[in-house]
Image (spheres, rainbow, N blue to C red):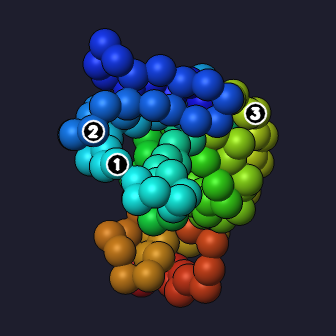
C-alpha cells in the first residue's frame, strides 16, 4: 500500500515513517482496496526502546458478479441480504458468500461462491428449474367443470398451470 503522513516534516524510508511528535493523519491506499485514513499520536520513544508500530489493515473493495440465468428474471440475496436483480451484474463483498436466487414459478437456487473482491469481475451461470407444470383435463359430460384445491371452477376442457406438489382435482358436472 502507499502510506503517507500529512505534514511538511514527515518522510518515509523502507518500512519506516518519520513524523513530528503530535497528532498526525496517516493515509493508506492500494488499488482494489478502500482507502484508509487514521489519526495517530506520534510520541518520542524512550531511549533504547523500539519505535512504536502502527498496523493498518485495508478492506478489500467488493467484487462484481455477472450472473447469467438464461434469461429468467430473478432476485438475489447475498448472505440473506437483498443484493439486486439478475440476469446482470451485482456488487458482492469479497470472501465466501451464500447467494440465493429466487424467481416466480422456479425453485430457489442456493449457491456458495468465493468472491475475489478488489473490483474483480467474475461470471456465474445459474440454471433455474421450473416449479410449475401444465395439466390438461377434459371430460365427456357437457358443462363439466374442474376444481383445483377448492379454487374457482374452470370450464372443461382446460389446461391449467399448477405449482409443483400435491393437488386435489375434482370434476363436477350438472346432472
Which circle, 3 or 1, is nearer the viewer? 1
Q: Mark 3 points at which residue?
A: 123
Q: Mark 2 points at which residue?
A: 21
Q: Is residue 130 visible?
A: no
Disc 3/disc 1 C-alpha distance (Å): 52 Å
Q: In this view, does 35 lie to the left or right of 86?
A: left
Check contact, mark 3 vs mark 2: CB within 8 A: no
- Extreme front residue here? 47
Which residue is at 75% across, 40% downward?
Answer: 124
Residue 18 in the image: above or below residue 59: above
Which circle, 3 or 2, is nearer the viewer? 2
Neighbour class for label 3 at 10 Å: few (<14), some, many (≥20)? few
Which residue is at 44% across, 76% downward?
Answer: 147
Disc 3/disc 2 C-alpha distance (Å): 50 Å
Q: Mark 1 points at which residue?
A: 44
Give the position of the N terminus as an image quadrant. Answer: top right
Q: In this view, does 64 lie to the left or right of 8?
A: right
Check contact, mark 2 vs mark 1: CB within 8 A: yes
Give the position of the C terminus as an image quadrant. Answer: bottom left
Quarter of the image for residue 149 reads bottom left
Q: Nearer the viewer, residue 110 or 155?
A: 110
Q: Which of 134 and 77 is in front in this view?
A: 77
Which residue is at 64% across, 36% downward?
Answer: 15
Amino acid at each position: 500500500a502507499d502510506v503517507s503522513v500529512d505534514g511538511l516534516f514527515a518522510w518515509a524510508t523502507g518500512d519506516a515513517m518519520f513524523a513530528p511528535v503530535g497528532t498526525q493523519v496517516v493515509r493508506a491506499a492500494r488499488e482494489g482496496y478502500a482507502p484508509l485514513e487514521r489519526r495517530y499520536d506520534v510520541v518520542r520513544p524512550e531511549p533504547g526502546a523500539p519505535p512504536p508500530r502502527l498496523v493498518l489493515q485495508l478492506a478489500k473493495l467488493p467484487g462484481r458478479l455477472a450472473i447469467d440465468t438464461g434469461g429468467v428474471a430473478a432476485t438475489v440475496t447475498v448472505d440473506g441480504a437483498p443484493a439486486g436483480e439478475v440476469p446482470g451484474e451485482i456488487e458482492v463483498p469479497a470472501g465466501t458468500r451464500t447467494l440465493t436466487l429466487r424467481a416466480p414459478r422456479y425453485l430457489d437456487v442456493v449457491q456458495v461462491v468465493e468472491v475475489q473482491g478488489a473490483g474483480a469481475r467474475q461470471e456465474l451461470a445459474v440454471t433455474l428449474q421450473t416449479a410449475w407444470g401444465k395439466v390438461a383435463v377434459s371430460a365427456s359430460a357437457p358443462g363439466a367443470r374442474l376444481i383445483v384445491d377448492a379454487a374457482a371452477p374452470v370450464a372443461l376442457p382446460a389446461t391449467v398451470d399448477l405449482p409443483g406438489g400435491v393437488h386435489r382435482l375434482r370434476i363436477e358436472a350438472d346432472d
